[in-house]
Image: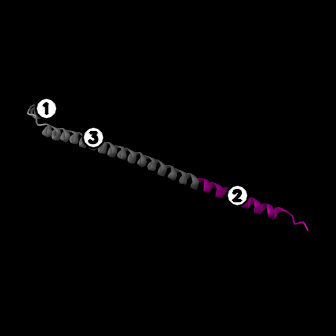
């Protein structure tokens, strides 16, 4: 493929067709630019895919932590309700046992 393009370029220069060679050169430059733009687009797509993957991992970890915190909160709330109940029972018992002072 490269050999064919080299032959075309040499034929145009040898025959004195500068205008044709300029069009050919512009076409080659255009193809290179298109190739670079395609490569950049693929790179951007890949970076976006990696970013989305990282966000999914972060969201998964956040959800897991929230679930663990809610379980821990429920256990602590149950313990605190038990402590509150005992404190209320002790308070009621203490009030019943104290003599009334007039």
Quarter holding residue 85? bottom right
Quarter holding residue 82? bottom right
**Residue that numbered label 3 is attached to:** 36
Q: How crowded is mark 1: few (under 14 residues within 10 Å), some or many (20 or more)?
A: few
Magenta span of residues: 75-102
Identified at 39% across, 46% down, the residue is: 53
Give residue 11's position: percent from left, percent from top.
Answer: 9, 33
Q: Distance between the residues labelled 1 and 3?
A: 21 Å
Which callout, 1 or 3, points at the residue further toward the start of the chain?
1
Name the quarter where the C terminus is drawn: bottom right
Identified at 39% across, 48% down, the residue is: 52
Q: Tell me the mark number nearer the camera, choosing from 3 and 2.
A: 3
Q: Which mark is residue 32?
A: none
SS for dot 2: helix
Indicate left or right for 100 with 7 as reference: right
**Residue that numbered label 1 is attached to:** 6
Q: How crowded is mark 2: few (under 14 residues within 10 Å), some or many (20 or more)?
A: few
Q: Distance between the residues labelled 3 and 2?
A: 74 Å
SS for dot 3: helix
Q: How far apart are marks 1 and 2 (CA)?
A: 94 Å
Indicate left or right for 48 with 72 as reference: left
Give residue 17's position: percent from left, percent from top.
Answer: 11, 37
Q: Is 91 one of the magenta-colored residues? A: yes
**Residue that numbered label 2 is attached to:** 86
Name the residue at the bottom extreme: 102
């Amino acid at each position: 493929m490269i050999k064919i393009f080299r032959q075309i370029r040499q034929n145009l220069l040898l025959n004195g067709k500068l205008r044709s060679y300029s069009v050919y050169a512009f076409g080659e430059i255009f193809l290179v630019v298109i190739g670079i733009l395609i490569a950049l687009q693929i790179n951007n797509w890949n970076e976006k895919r990696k970013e989305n993957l990282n966000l999914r991992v972060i969201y998964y970890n956040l959800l897991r932590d929230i679930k663990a915190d809610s379980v821990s909160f429920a256990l602590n709330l149950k313990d605190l309700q038990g402590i509150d109940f005992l404190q209320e029972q002790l308070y009621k018992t203490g009030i019943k046992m104290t003599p009334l002072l007039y």
